Amino acid sequence: MAALSRRLETPGLLILRVIIGFLIAAHGLQKLNGGPANFGRSALDSLGVPAPVLMGYVVTYAELAGGVLLIPACSPGSRPSSSPSTWSWPSCSSRSTWG
């Protein structure tokens, strides 16, 4: 049973990462289509966020880039050739299949 759960752990995390990355990127794309400035003025200004238009752009592009970058993160074969320890992501464990 333990061997089966270990074998399914990596594909399960990959599927979860792809789905979550797609959803975050889609949410950022939705904000981009509606206009980051409009999002800042309508949503962020009512919350009292300082510089709402600027933060609308920051949030929009952070969601879009973060979602896209989450999809390939820590998948086997995508690791940089020289990776300092500061580049490791919390989802990358020592049990990875990188060898």
Image (cartoon, helix red, strand yellow):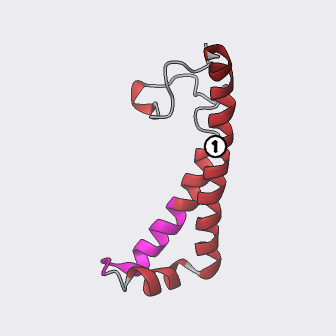
Residue occupying image coordinates x 44% and y 82% = 43
Q: Which residue is mark 1?
A: 16
Residue 63 locus on image (x, y percent): 53, 60
Residue occupying image coordinates x 57% and y 55% = 65
> Which residue is nearer to you in this view: 21 or 1?
1
Residue occupying image coordinates x 62% and y 43% = 17
Q: Based on the displayed image, in which of its 4 quarters is residue 49 positioned?
A: bottom left
Residue 61 locus on image (x, y percent): 53, 64
Residue 95 locus on image (x, y percent): 54, 18
> Which residue is nearer to you in this view: 15 or 74?
15
> Which residue is nearer to you in this view: 89 or 84?
89
**What's the magenta region?**
48-62
> Which residue is nearer to you in this view: 89 or 16?
16
Q: Main secondary structure of the magenta part?
A: helix
In the image, residue 80 sits, relative to residue 36, either above or below, namely: above
38 relative position to 71: left or right: left
In the image, residue 93 sits, relative to residue 70, either above or below, namely: above
Residue type at mark 1: give it.
Answer: Leu
